[in-house]
Structure formats: C-alpha cells, structure tokens
Amino acid sequence: MKTYLITGGAGFIGSTLSERILKDGNRVIAIDNFNDFYDYKIKVKNVLEVNNKKHNFEKESKELTIKKLQEIVNSENYKLEYADIRDLKELERIFEENKIDIVIHLAGLGGVRPSIEDPLLYEEVNVRGTNNIFEVMRRKGVKKILAASSSSVYGNNESVPFKETDIVDFAISPYAASKKANEVLAHTYHHLFNIDVGMLRFFTVFGPRQRPDLAIYKFTKLIDENKEIPFFGDGSTSRDYTYVDDIVKGVMLLSDYVEKNNNVYEISNIGGNDPVSLREMVETIEEVLGKEAKINYLPMQPGDVNRTYADLTKIQNLVGYSADNTFKEGIEKFVKWYLKEKN
C-alpha cells in the first residue's frame, strides 16, 4: 500500500483522483482549505462521495461542517486535512505525522480572468504555496512529486499542436505566469535537492464534479434554465478539452513513472488531442441537452488565449497515454451527472 498526499484533494480533479487511488487499494491524505472561490459545500459533497458516505450539513457553520466531515470520513485509508498550502507549519505537521510516498500537488487558485483582478493573491497562493510544498518535502525527505501546471503557459503560441519543448516565456495572464513560475521552481528543487518531479500541463479539464464557474458547467446550467450564455468573440476560439477520467489516467501513469525512476524532471501535456471551437462546444451541449442556447455575444476577454492544442507525443512515448473519451462522449457523461445532481 502506497500513501499519496493530494493537495486540493477535495476539489474536482483531486476528489476524482482520490477515488481512483482508493479503488487501487492505496491510501490518500487529502489536503484542502475549502476556500470561498466557490461554495465550499460542493467540496464537502465530493469528499462524502469519495468515501461512500452521506450526511446533511445544511444547518452547521463551515468550520463545524468540516470538523464533522473529518470525523465521518477519516479512516485507515483516507485522511482529510483542513489546511492551507500557505501555512508552512501546518504542512510540516502533516508530513511529520504521515509516511508519504508521493505528493500530487493540485491545490491553487484557478481561472484566467480572476487572476487579472487579483494577481497578488494568485502569486501568494500558487507560487508561495507551491514553494512551501517543495520546501517541506526537502525538510522531511520526501522525494517524489507530481504538480499541476496548465496549458495556459503556452499563451498565444503560434505553432500547433503545443509541444513541451516550445518556448513558454510569454504568459498573457497572472494565472499562466504563476504556473510557469512553478515549473521553474520545481526544476530548482529537482536540481539542488534531488526531488523527482513530473509537471502536468492540463488542457481544459471537464466532467462530473467540475467547478460551477467553468464554461461547460456554466453553459450547461444556463442552457438548461433557458437563460442567456455569455459568448466571447466570434466562436472560433478553441480548446483541447480533456475528460476528467483521462486526466486521472494520465496522472496515475505518470505517478508510476516518477515513483519507479530516479533523476526525473519531466513536463508533460495531458490533453484530449482534439480541439473544439467555442461554437462547436455550445452546439454539442445543445444537442445532448436537447435545448437551444440563447446567446449573448460579447467581445473577447483580456487574458484569454485563441486556442489550445496538446501534442501528446511525449506522454505517449513516456507512459503510453492516450485519451479514451471523445469530447461528445465526455459531454454526454457530464450532462447525465448534471441532470442527476439537479434533481
């Protein structure tokens, strides 16, 4: 049995990954601060689902809810830590109390547009928080980590598909800059302290438990409720959408690679390898929902990239990864989940 420490473990990707790790017979320590970027109760529900538990916390405060949640779910194989990656002392306590085999660092603030509104907060959480993770690993002798980067680091890269060898020095949002900074920081700790690192450049992840502020969830909800959707630009911008189960598949393959090898510093794209335009995305949701969208046409937003498109050659050669779900298959699974959650 291996112990995985997952930061952001109550979130969308973190909870889905935790579920997979537990099914494989391994142990999870999930760190999350349940911040107010969106309703913390969504994360509470994620944790309950991962542990096959049910409870109604409607009448309790946030702090009491999370305290009771820990009592309900904590077991030999799963431990929930209510902690912030900016708190180095608390991280040290968690590392001291547990024998950790590998860290999967997913915690951080997401979103391009919010990062433009508050760039200092994004630096504080995403960069300082990540530095804390690497520093406590150095101090406690933990040598294996996978850490989330983002396709946003490519900016408006003119060459497609995006390759890990492309120059990524031209970020166009504070969020993207924070992710590029983390890649450089990770290499520093690899070089100086022999920490084996896999940096994960995720390409627009979607699926059940997706954050409600993200486009696919938001558009599905608005179309279902016959409300206008915000449609930025002419619809030609495109994203390499990746279904969450394919992200988890890639993370597990890369975690095995990092665990079994030494002197590792690898940056890997994890994507769907099939870019979808904004217009096609809306049309697919319309088709699957069986409802027509009401569109509010708006200008392009600052910080938004024109397209993302993952070259998967490296991860295919390294660990044999390929995406199993087409975009439409993923939307069908997401909509099925959304309609079930709504009722």
Image (cartoon, rainbow, N blue to C red):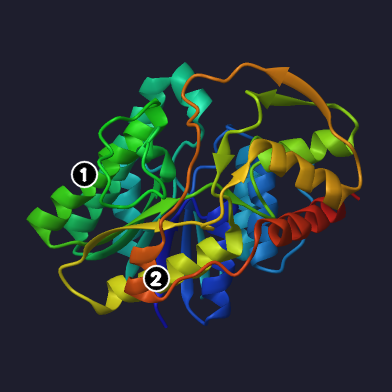
User: Considering the numbered disc 1 on the image, is that residue within a helix, a strand or a loop?
Assistant: helix
Separation of marks 1 and 2 at Cα, in angstroms: 25 Å
Task: Give above or below for 257 relative to 108.
Answer: below
Label 1 sits on what residue type?
Answer: Leu
Where is residue 118 shown, x and y percent of the image? Answer: 44, 19
Check residue 316 in the rendering and tell me which mark sits there, or answer none.
2
For the residue pair 66 and 183, the one nearer the viewer reads as 183
User: Considering the numbered disc 2 on the image, is that residue within a helix, a strand or a loop?
Assistant: helix
Q: At x 52% / y 61%, what residue is drawn?
A: 247
Q: Residues within 10 Å of mark 1 (few under 14, many from 20)?
A: some
Of label 1 and label 2, which has the lower sequence position?
1
Is any part of residue 217 visible from this angle? no
Q: Is residue 287 left or right of residue 309?
A: right
From the image, tell me which residue sits under label 1: 185
Q: At x 78% / y 58%, what residue is drawn?
A: 332
Is any part of residue 219 visible from this angle? yes
Q: Is residue 54 left or right of residue 306?
A: right
Where is residue 110 shown, x and y percent of the image? Answer: 49, 37
For the residue pair 140 and 96, the one nearer the viewer reads as 140
Q: Quadrant where the N terminus lies?
A: bottom left
Q: At x 36% / y 21%, what residue is drawn?
A: 120
Q: Residues within 10 Å of mark 2 (few under 14, many from 20)?
A: some
Label 2 sits on what residue type?
Answer: Gln
